[in-house]
Image (tube, helix red, strand yellow):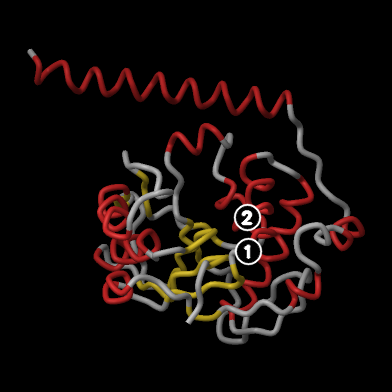
Amino acid sequence: MHTLAAPALRSTFSTVMDFLFAAHVYTVAFMCPRHSLSARQLGEVGHEYLPARVIDGFVLRPARISAQAQLLAPAPVLALAPYTSAAARLLVDWKERGDVNAAAVMRLIMARAFADMRGANTPLGAPLQASCNDARALRVVPVPPHWRTRIARAGDPLTDLAETSGADIIPALRRGPSRDQVGLSQRERMINADRGFSLNRRVVPDGEAVFVVDDVVTTGATVVNCGQLLTSGGWRVGALVALFAKRFD
């Protein structure tokens, strides 16, 4: 009886969570509509977080991660900018508050990262141009958020950001039950990341390179685990990329 009831309970729980998530998303969309910025306004924002000249100077470079994560990394771990207090405030305003100015700045930062990932000197804020070797969009696997985070933020800001910045989103990863990484030790982060992600078997690797993308890298446990999973599933991982890092080599 217990064996027969378990699938029904899981199905009921999944249905209830889907309903609550949809209700939350539509409520937020109705109560807090988001307005897009014009091209002129897009050029004006950013000074309260990071000056445009600072963003323009960001370059992808190796991030310093834990020794264990470094040994296990299937590809280089790169980050664009230091995780300063201004960057922390920017991320909170973007992810937690849905601030339109913060989102505009994040699009500029993501564009800067994509330009380096392509290996092309693309001007900041201009449409992303593919390198001469590949005319297609960048293939990006965003690190999926925890379902509680997805509900609290009414979606997945990182995936939305990558998509609106011109990336081809590859949903090759799933997020399972796990703890938030904040406050965990290095060893706990590795164990938690190992338990928290799985491959999306509905998405089949095709031999083309993909980039794992996250917003912040600290010990590297999350992006390294995601990269390992993709590699084990037959994906070719070009790099593990974060927009911000607490430490650089």
User: Residue 120 versus residue 203: which sits nearer the camera?
Assistant: 120
- 2 and 1 marks in contact (CB < 8 Å): yes
Q: Position of residue 222 (x, y in %)?
A: 38, 58
In the rendered image, the quadrant that contains the N terminus is top left
Q: Determine which of the numbered discs, if any, sits on residue 88 in the image.
A: 2
**Amino acid type of the residue that numbered disc 2 sits on in the rendered structure:** Ala
**Amino acid type of the residue that numbered disc 1 sits on in the rendered structure:** Thr
Crowdedness of circle 2 by 10 Å Cα count: few (<14), some, many (20+)? Answer: some
Relative to 7, 94 lies left or right: right
Residue drawn at point x = 48 percent, y = 80 percent: 62
Q: Position of residue 42 (x, y in %)?
A: 84, 58
Residue drawn at point x = 76 percent, y = 38 percent: 34
Q: Position of residue 35 (x, y in %)?
A: 81, 40
25 lies above or below 142: above
Quickly name the residue at label 1.
84
Circle 2 sits in a helix, a strand or a loop, which is it?
A: helix
Q: Quadrant of residue 232?
A: bottom left
Q: Position of residue 40 (x, y in %)?
A: 92, 59
Relative to 198, 160 lies left or right: right
Q: Quadrant of residue 125?
A: bottom right
Report, in whole angstroms, how far the alpha carbon at label 2 lies from the one at label 1.
6 Å
Residue drawn at point x = 80 percent, y = 75 percent: 53
225 lies above or below 98: below
Residue found farthest to the top? 1
Residue drawn at point x = 55 percent, y = 44 percent: 156
Circle 1 sits in a helix, a strand or a loop, which is it?
A: loop
Relative to 20, 123 lies left or right: right
Crowdedness of circle 1 by 10 Å Cα count: few (<14), some, many (20+)? Answer: few
How many marks overall? 2
